[in-house]
Image (cartoon, helix red, strand yellow):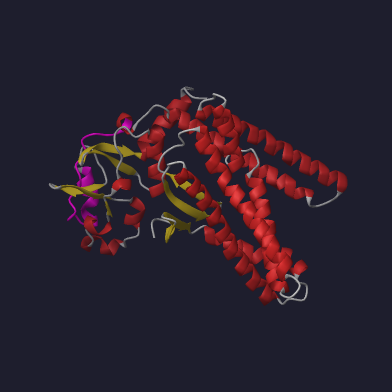
Amino acid sequence: MLGYHISLGRLSGVPVRLDVTWFLLAGGLVWALPRLFLQSLLPDASLALLRAAAVVIALLFGLVVLIHELAHALAARARHLNPLHITLSLAGGGLSLAEDHASPLDQLSIALAGPLSTLIMGAVFAGFWRVLEPFAPVMGAIARTMALVCLTLGGLNLLPALPLDGGKALSAGFWALGVDPLSADRWAGLFGRWAGLLMTLFGILMWFNTGVREWVWVAVIGILVEGGAHTALRRQGVLRALQGRTAADVMVRGCVPLPSSLTLDQLDSALAQRSVPCLLVGDERGLAGLLRVSRLRRVRPEAWPATTLQEVMLPLDDQLQVPPELPLARVLHRLTELGLDEIPVMRDGALLGVVTRQAVHRLIETSLAMGLHD
């Protein structure tokens, strides 16, 4: 387990992680599906049977989301981009790439791969539904539910609104027309906000005029689309604030790594004695690893005198260091993904400095406050 993620291994060479929030999503499905949907399909089934069917649907839904993200990952690999990992969470799923898209075609092909795979799975489940329903009604109901889920999920993802896949495809279109990538994302985000607002108003008006409750779902989807687009626009503001900046621009020099033999009860005093406090661990042979605050907090206070930094540090690897020329947006992404407060800047094994999350956030706040980036 890394932070709040559980490693599920690799799929086609891509690491798969399960965020603990996914269990909230699965639990919500198991709780809601029997009474709100499955009971109408299987009126004679017991509650226990409906619950069992809901568990199967929740697991299949996780598999569908995983295949959706794997389609993104395989499309990225086909475009010579390296997928870092797939994460399943309360929000569904997400794919992290080691580098940014190199062209509009990269972004378009990767964006469309996921929804298309989901729509294909919807068609497959619909076929199973037709075959199974006459002689296996429970299995048929599960297949019918999954067909509806896949077709709905695939269709919604094609809506031209960031951060949905359709919004990424729209952004790729703007990019292909000569708009720079950040501005293309901004236009796609604005389009998503207006589309979400119009969907919300349309759904509410149709509900009041017709009395058909299903129109409420159109309004709910509109609210979600508008909220997602608003979040995407805020992210674009952050990326603009970091545009043109690298790790070398904000790194702090003069960090002296802490000895690995130091115990946790000695940590505070050791940091206080340094002119540049940092959470790196090493010795005369070089940097060995780094500390994460959340990991330190898991150690009971009574165990601090007997626990060394060597025992709780994260061993240094390629993901736990950055080169000085790495764009600052990628550095912030790395810090966030790994749950780190700081990360060493290195060149050929030599420590050049440290980038802290606080320094990056301070730069963002200063840039936005000065109105340097709209």
Residue 180: image location, x then y, percent:
51, 26
In the image, 81 versus 60, the foreground residue is 81
- Indicate left or right for 152 with 80 as reference: right
- Indicate left or right for 168 with 294 as reference: right
Question: Does 269 appear in magenta?
Answer: yes
- Indicate left or right for 178 with 370 as reference: right
Q: Residue at x 34, y 51 (%)?
A: 293
In the image, 233 versus 319, the foreground residue is 319
Residue 312: image location, x then y, percent:
27, 57
- Indicate left or right for 295 with 243 as reference: left
Q: Residue at x 14, y 48 (%)?
A: 285
Q: Give the magenta-colored segment's residue range.
A: 250-272
In the image, 263 versus 181, the foreground residue is 181
Residue 263: image location, x then y, percent:
21, 57
The image quadrant that residue 58 belongs to is bottom right
The answer to whether residue 58 is above or below residue 47 is above
